[in-house]
Image (cartoon, helix red, strand yellow):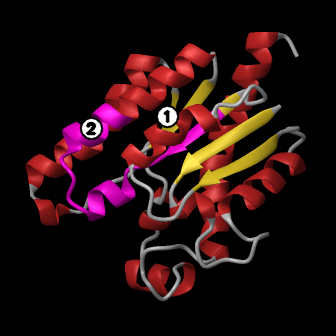
Amino acid sequence: MVIAALGDSLTQGYGLSPDQGFVPQLEAWLAERGVEARLINAGVSGDTTAGGLSRVDWTLGDEVDAMIVALGGNDMLRGIDPATSRANLDGILARAEEAGVEVLLVGMSAPGNYGPDYKAAFDGMYPALSERYGTLYADDFLGALADLPDRRQAMADYMQPDGIHPNADGVSLIVEDLGPEVASLAERVRDGDGD
């Protein structure tokens, strides 16, 4: 089974050695639990939902059975209108549906500095789109780190010095958090095609 991870620097493994990024750690996590899956790293640093939409057809090659979609962080950092981000994500999910590819949509949580309306629109687009397309859903890529009790200590222990990207230990926590969702994604594929 082949799972493509369509995302930005968080997926790509920015600042980490090739074996420490999200995709290789997740592949190893799945293998340890008997889930046979090859992951394709379709993460591009700096990518927005528009970038993801522009390359989703290339990502959805004939061999891809499932896709993790983790985009939106750079849209948020640039203050892009959530309606634009939502339309792009909608396009990505529509392409996946047309291709018969199961999806795990991974959300992001906007900070409050753009105001409550922006946060509500941004945070809310993910569950709404997941429901519309019947995808699996995880509410926050960085949720495992955001939920730690001591935020300052968590930043020191699990983030790179830029304060935006997780270090290898931070990625491990993210994989522990999202791994079961990806295992469920693999199970959906197996149940759907009888392999």
Residue range in magenta is 67-88
Label 2 sits on what residue type? Answer: Gly
Q: Residue at x 73, y 77 (%)?
A: 17
Q: Residue at x 29, y 36 (%)?
A: 86
Point out the image quarter for the N terminus. Answer: top right
Q: Position of residue 94 (x, y in %)?
A: 45, 21
The residue to which callout 1 is attached is 137
Does the segment drawn in magenta span residue 158? no
Label 1 sits on what residue type? Answer: Tyr
Q: Residue at x 79, y 35 (%)?
A: 2
In the rendered view, does 123 fall on the left or right side of 149? left
Q: Which one is nearer the viewer's eye here, 64 or 25?
A: 64
Point out the image quarter for the C terminus. Answer: top right
Q: Residue 124, which numbered label? A: 2
Q: Which one is nearer the viewer's eye here, 104 or 138?
A: 104
Q: Position of residue 138 (x, y in %)?
A: 49, 41
